[in-house]
């Protein structure tokens, strides 16, 4: 039973604690390798192929126990293990998102001012803008040339790499700024990243910009107008690390929601011959409302289900509908951990705690639960039963006090199909900041919970 005072470290055996430490090392490596949705998809595919998963697009016939992968637009992915029961009886799915708040480059970003060159940016997702100032930033992404060639960019991660940064105003001259409301003190339009200061000798004007342009051309074969067809993201350049003298926590960028992506990936890699087909799905664009053709408001789940049925020789639209309506799902996403520095926004009987176990969040939403998927108690009862039977230590969670703010997850877009779904993930301190903090014990419990659900949830 969930209790607010629960500290799950007390309940975990020493043997399991050493397993948790090993698991966490792999997780930290993953966070350092996968800072964008594209990099996360590459990581997932690599792991899946090592574990013997085959490309659904190349498989002719669907067989029980088969391990399959699918990707879309290089930014979303799904891993499936075909169950003993027909797909039309529904799947057990775990769905996470692999995009994270960040600073994107504008399509025409490059300019010079006062002997310095800059990139103009447009932030992505919900950020507190001041947190992104005066920290080292790495540039990740792709530039697509007109002839289709792809230039992969990853600058700022290697020890010898330079980094970029957005300078903050010195306190000496910030009297007026400091008197502003926090949300207005730093303007989105002012998040310009410093990228150079060396002049191109002999050039008449815009010498610093000319130097950068020349460098981009010679080093990466990027012309200025190539930024039009690019997807370039500024992310924190520092590495994920263990946090605390006791090394009980992990700090790092993008743990909302790559903590769910990693734990569900590790889980499905270990699922064997499930009764119901297991689907582990990784989607994009959650942080901006699940829009676009890689976000869950599009037909990703429906098209993938239709594709699986088609490969099984079944083109009935009714069966697509039935498979989805009869599915069970965990919307794998993080919740806010109670922060004792800000007790005024948390209601401690129902909010989630660091090291309190994986969080089951019945509903999210704002005000009177607006835009929330409020999970059905019949389903929740079975999920907590499954967790208890499998030694998955868990707690309840709610996103802060009533009327204090709010937020949503992809759960509502899955519920749309009629499937049972509940939010389930790790409690995070400093969510959406460049350095989010989680408890290693909670991360491990998320993995155990997702694995039990995909392996053996019966409904
Ligand atoms: Mn999230
Ligand atoms: Mn988020």
Image (tube, grey):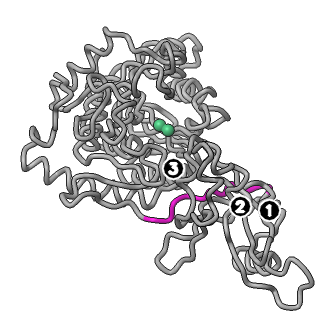
Q: Choose top left, top right, bottom left or bottom right for residue 400.
A: top left
Frontmost residue, 423 versus 455: 423
Picture layout, residue 412 above or below residue 393: above
Frontmost residue, 371 versus 271: 371
* Residue at screen point 14% across, 43% down: 9
Q: Which residue is mark 2?
A: 143
- Which quadrant is home to the N terminus? top left
Residue range corresponding to the magenta coloring: 228-238
SS majority, magenta: strand
Which SS class for mark 3? helix
Which SS class for mark 2? strand
Does residue 222 show up?
yes
Q: Which residue is mark 3?
A: 41
* Residue at screen point 66% across, 59% down: 142
Pointer 3 local density, CA inside 10 Å: few below 14, some 14–19, many at least 20: many
**Marks 1 and 2 in Cβ contact (< 8 Å):** yes
In the image: residue 343, left or right of residue 287: left
CA–CA distance in space, label 3 to label 2: 17 Å
């Amino acid at each position: 039973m969930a209790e607010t005072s629960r500290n799950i470290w007390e309940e975990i055996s020493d043997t399991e604690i050493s397993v948790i430490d090993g698991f966490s090392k792999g997780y930290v490596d993953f966070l350092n390798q996968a800072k964008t949705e594209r990099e996360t998809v590459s990581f997932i595919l690599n792991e899946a192929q090592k574990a013997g998963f085959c490309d659904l697009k190349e498989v002719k016939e669907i067989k029980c126990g088969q391990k399959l992968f699918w990707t879309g637009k290089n930014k979303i992915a799904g891993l499936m293990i075909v169950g003993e029961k027909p797909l039309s009886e529904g799947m057990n799915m775990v769905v996470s998102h692999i995009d994270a708040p960040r600073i994107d480059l504008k399509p025409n970003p490059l300019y010079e001012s006062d002997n310095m060159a800059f990139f103009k940016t447009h932030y992505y997702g919900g950020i507190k803008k001041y947190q992104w100032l005066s920290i080292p930033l790495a540039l990740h992404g792709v530039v697509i040339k007109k002839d289709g060639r792809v230039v992969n960019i990853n600058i700022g991660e290697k020890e010898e790499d330079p980094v970029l940064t957005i300078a903050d105003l010195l306190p000496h001259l910030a009297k007026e700024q400091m008197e502003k409301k926090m949300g207005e003190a730093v303007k989105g339009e002012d998040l310009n990243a410093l990228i150079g200061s060396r002049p191109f000798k002999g050039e008449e004007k815009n010498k610093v910009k000319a130097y950068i342009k020349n460098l981009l051309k010679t080093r990466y074969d990027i012309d200025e107008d190539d930024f039009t067809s690019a997807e370039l993201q500024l992310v924190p350049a520092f590495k994920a690390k263990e946090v605390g003298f006791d090394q009980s926590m992990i700090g790092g960028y993008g743990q909302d929601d790559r903590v769910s992506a990693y734990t569900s990936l590790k889980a499905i890699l270990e699922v064997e011959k499930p009764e119901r087909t297991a689907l582990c799905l990784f989607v994009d664009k959650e942080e901006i409302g699940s829009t676009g053709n890689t976000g869950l408001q599009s037909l990703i789940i429906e098209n993938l289900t239709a594709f699986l049925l088609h490969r099984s020789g079944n083109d009935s639209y009714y069966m697509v509908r039935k498979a989805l309506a009869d599915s069970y799902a965990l919307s794998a996403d993080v919740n806010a951990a109670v922060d004792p520095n800000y007790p005024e926004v948390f209601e401690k009987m129902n909010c989630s705690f660091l090291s309190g176990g994986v969080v089951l969040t019945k509903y999210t939403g704002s005000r009177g639960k607006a835009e929330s998927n409020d999970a059905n108690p019949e389903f929740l009862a079975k999920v907590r039963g499954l967790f208890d039977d499998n030694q998955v230590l868990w707690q309840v969670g709610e996103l802060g006090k009533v009327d204090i703010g709010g937020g949503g997850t992809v759960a509502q877009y899955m519920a749309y199909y009629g499937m049972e779904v509940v939010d389930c993930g790790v409690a995070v301190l400093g969510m959406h900041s460049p350095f989010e903090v989680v408890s290693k014990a909670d991360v491990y419990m998320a993995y155990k919970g997702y694995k039990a659900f995909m392996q053996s949830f019966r409904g």
